[in-house]
Amino acid sequence: MKTRDQMIAEAKARITEITPQEAIERRENGDDAVYLDVREPGEWNLFRIPDAVLVPLSEIATTVEEKVPKEARVVVYCARGNRSAIVADAMQQMGYGDVVSLAGGITGWAHAGGSIDDS
């Protein structure tokens, strides 16, 4: 049996993470990546990256293919970067070819000056 921390560490070893600064720069330079929020709806309702798509971690296996095309560039994020690592790993196994996890999650994004939608 693996611990949650072991699962996260293993996922992070198999995926690519980008810093909030890198993500902000990409977005400011016109990158059209899909920002996939894998937090729960209650977290989403507080604030999110503008134009993000919500698919909670618990629904990834059943819903992500309906909302995010496999050929899309995807930046997965959560609150601090742990759930997003697990989802990015799962999406790679599902055949998504260009998926990264946002290190530090939306918390890091906000602290780095990224825009937030709280409406």
Image (tube, helix red, strand yellow):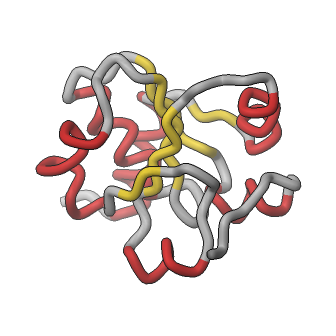
State whether residue 116 is above or below residue 100.
below
Q: Position of residue 58 (x, y in %)?
A: 23, 63
In the picture, measured across the screen, residue 66 lies left or right of residue 30, that is left
State the residue at coordinates (29%, 27%): 69
Question: Can you tell which quarter of the image residue 81 is in?
Answer: bottom right
Q: Position of residue 15 (x, y in %)?
A: 46, 29
Image label count: 0
State the residue at coordinates (48%, 39%): 12
Query: From this viewpoint, which residue is outermost toward the front?
Result: 119
In the picture, measured across the screen, residue 77 lies left or right of residue 72, that is right
Q: Where is residue 98 in the image (x, y as percent from the top left)?
A: 44, 20
State whether residue 99 is above or below residue 97.
below
Query: From this viewpoint, which residue is outermost toward the left?
Result: 62
The one of 28 and 99 positioned closer to us in this rendering: 28
State whether residue 56 is above or below residue 21.
below
State the residue at coordinates (65%, 60%): 106
